[in-house]
């Protein structure tokens, strides 16, 4: 049986590698991300893109090195495809994502164009916004692509735990 493929978006790696936060919600997400990464990530084929690499390389050099080291074993998907740009533009034009979130639209588009079934993210503002999910899905389908399921590490942990109990 082949592993499920999952596109790992930038926010997940940031939560994985950042220093522990003083904010309780952020710290909780960091701990859940670390738990998923240690216990369950090996159950998936983890993928990223040059968009992820570019984002992670910004900021303090030491922190950027930690982030890039965390994804050094991930396969990077080709982003040099016209369909990715077209779908990202379509997501913005339809109002599924605002124009300031072009990079987030590119993450979704890269995932869908490559047929990756899961997009792992902590970005609920633009990528996994529950108020926009149906519109994102519709735009992807209108462009001929099956939309990815937008999930966070805690959702996968819950899914994995439920599977083990059955």
Image (tube, grey):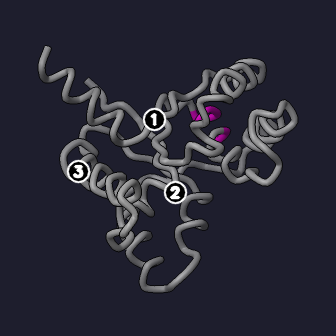
Vertical position of residue 148 compared to residue 8: above or below? above
Q: Does the magenta stretch include residue 112?
A: yes
- Stretch of the chain drawn in magenta: 109-114
Q: Which residue is drawn at 35% across and 73% down?
A: 19
Residue at which label 1 appears: 151
Q: Name the outermost residue toward the left.
A: 165
**Residue 75 percent location from the top left of the image:** 44, 52
Vertical position of residue 112 compared to residue 143: above or below? below
For mark 2, give the secondary structure: helix
In this image, 137 relative to 60: left or right? right
- Pick the front one: 65 or 14: 14
Q: Marks 3 and 2, Cα distance to the nearest angstrom? A: 17 Å
In this image, 114 relative to 132: left or right? left
Q: Residue at x 28, y 45 (%)?
A: 41
Q: Is residue 72 magenta?
A: no
Residue at which label 2 appears: 10
Q: Residue at x 32, y 38 (%)?
A: 44
Say which of marks 3 and 2 sits in front. 3
For mark 1, give the secondary structure: strand
Residue at which label 3 appears: 35
Q: Going from the N terminus, do you reach mark 1 or mark 3 first?
A: 3
For mark 3, give the secondary structure: helix
């Amino acid at each position: 049986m082949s592993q499920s493929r999952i596109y790992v978006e930038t926010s997940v790696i940031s939560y994985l590698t950042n220093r522990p936060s003083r904010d309780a919600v952020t710290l909780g997400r960091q701990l859940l991300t670390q738990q998923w990464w240690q216990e369950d990530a090996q159950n998936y084929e983890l993928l990223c893109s040059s968009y992820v690499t570019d984002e992670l390389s910004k900021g303090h050099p030491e922190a950027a090195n930690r982030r890039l080291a965390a994804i050094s074993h991930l396969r990077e998907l080709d982003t040099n495809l016209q369909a990715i740009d077209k779908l990202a533009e379509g997501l913005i034009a339809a109002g599924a994502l605002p124009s300031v979130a072009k990079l987030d639209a590119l993450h979704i588009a890269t995932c869908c164009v490559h047929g990756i079934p899961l997009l792992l993210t902590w970005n609920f503002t633009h990528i996994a916004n529950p108020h926009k999910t149906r519109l994102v899905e519709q735009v992807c389908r209108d462009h001929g692509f099956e939309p990815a399921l937008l999930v966070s590490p805690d959702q996968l942990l819950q899914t994995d735990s439920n599977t083990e109990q059955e």
